[in-house]
Image (cartoon, rainbow, N blue to C red):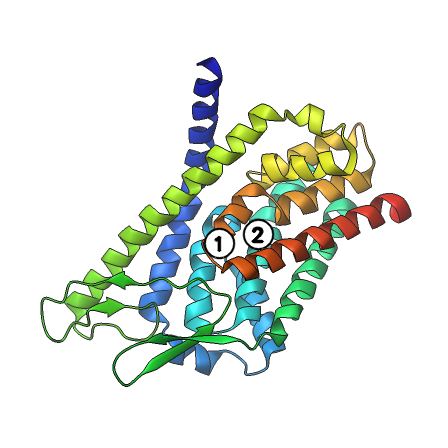
């Protein structure tokens, strides 16, 4: 009973910490649905996939959504932009290189600016490497918009659509996160409100699941025990305890007293790209095959850099 109470308290505490960012992400997702349809993105984005990658990276730097707020907007970007590389670049950048993340690391690791710079360089390498792989992605799926039209979207994106009450003939019966929206202002407001509420409930539930998993893992595997288990313990610490950038930086700062700078950098990279909250959210963003590829790419990239840091640099 005591363990159950501890688990519930820990899960709810983490949920309350991350929920405001989920709220912000859902707000931006709804705004993107209503204000930036596919034709707008087709005009604004470069035709070159590498240019789209750079655009996604820049957007990730400008929107500091982090682990909690990024997934709703990432899923929206897959549909609205049609660019796989751009959406993935945005996701990886906003969780690793946005100004709040870098500032939290700088504040926590005072006097270790070189370590923060090293982290930023390695994170940028991972972002460009993984996003670059998806610049070659050409598979598409179709979404029916009506009797005479279909919409093409990236094959890795998980589809989702929400119903709209069709109280008037002018209001379409379905919102597909694409370009078909009510023309009457009142119905556009209704569409935005309904999408916002449904997405907020959806992502809040996913956040609760993720926090429950993290809380259970933290009770089963204390941080001190994980940090003594070598590379696997390092991966476990990053997966279970990297709830926020400040927390990740604090754990890295703690590890600097007992381990090398390479271990601290490896923990920062693991907590950024392989933390449990982000990976559980990703299930609701991409299809299972793409999910497996992304997790494998992230895991191998972080593991390779961690081994290189510890055996050849520090």
Q: Above or below — where is 243 with respect to 71?
A: above
Q: Above or below — where is 250 with respect to 72?
A: above
Q: Nearer the viewer, residue 108 or 134?
A: 134
Give coordinates of residue 61: x percent, y percent: 57, 59
Residue 185 located left or right of residue 310: left
Give coordinates of residue 24: x percent, y percent: 40, 51
User: Which quadrant would the C terminus be assigned to in this image?
Assistant: top right
- What residue occupies the far right of the structure in this picture? 312
Residue, x 61% and y 52% (percent of image)?
A: 96
Give coordinates of residue 208: x percent, y percent: 41, 38
Residue 217 located left or right of residue 70: right
Q: Above or below — where is 20 with respect to 301?
A: above
Q: Residues within 10 Å of mark 2 (few under 14, many from 20)?
A: many
In the drawing, what numbered circle is on residue 70? 1
Q: Residues within 10 Å of mark 1 (few under 14, many from 20)?
A: many
- What residue occupies the far top of the structure in this picture? 2
Check disc 2 and report its element: helix, strand or loop: helix
Give coordinates of residue 113: x percent, y percent: 75, 45
Q: Nearer the viewer, residue 257 or 179?
A: 179
Check disc 1 and report its element: helix, strand or loop: helix
Q: Which residue is mark 2?
A: 95
Residue 303 located left or right of residue 149: right
Task: Give the Cα separation between the discs numbered 1 and 2.
Answer: 7 Å
Residue, x 57% and y 52% (percent of image)?
A: 95
Q: Are marks 1 and 2 in contact (CB under 8 Å)?
A: yes
Sequence-first disc among 1 and 2: 1
């Amino acid at each position: 009973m005591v363990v159950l109470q501890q688990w519930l308290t820990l899960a709810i505490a983490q949920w309350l910490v991350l929920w405001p960012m989920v709220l912000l992400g859902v707000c931006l997702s709804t705004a993107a649905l209503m204000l930036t349809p596919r034709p707008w993105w087709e005009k604004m984005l470069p035709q070159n996939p590498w240019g789209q990658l750079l655009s996604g990276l820049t957007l990730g730097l400008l929107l500091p959504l982090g682990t909690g707020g990024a997934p709703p907007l990432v899923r929206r970007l897959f549909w609205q932009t049609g660019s796989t590389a751009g959406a993935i670049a945005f996701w990886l950048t906003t969780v690793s290189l946005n100004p709040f993340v870098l500032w939290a690391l700088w504040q926590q690791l005072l006097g270790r600016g070189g370590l923060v710079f090293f982290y930023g360089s390695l994170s940028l390498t991972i972002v460009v490497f993984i996003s670059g792989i998806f610049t070659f992605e050409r598979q598409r799926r179709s979404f029916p918009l009506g009797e005479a039209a279909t919409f093409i979207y990236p094959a890795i994106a998980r589809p989702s659509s929400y119903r709209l009450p069709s109280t008037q003939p002018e209001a379409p019966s379905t919102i597909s996160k694409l370009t078909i929206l009510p023309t009457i202002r009142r119905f556009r407001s209704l569409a935005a409100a309904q999408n916002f509420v449904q997405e907020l409930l959806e992502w809040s539930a996913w956040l609760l699941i993720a926090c429950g998993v993290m809380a259970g893992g933290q009770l089963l595997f204390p941080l001190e025990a994980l940090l003594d288990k070598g590379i696997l313990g390092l991966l476990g610490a990053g997966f279970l305890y990297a709830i926020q950038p400040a927390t990740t930086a604090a754990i890295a700062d703690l590890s600097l007293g007992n381990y090398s700078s390479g271990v601290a950098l490896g923990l920062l990279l693991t907590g950024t790209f392989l933390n449990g909250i982000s990976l559980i959210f990703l299930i609701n963003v991409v299809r299972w095959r793409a999910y497996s590829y992304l997790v494998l790419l992230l895991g191998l990239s972080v593991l390779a850099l961690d081994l290189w840091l510890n055996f050849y640099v520090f």
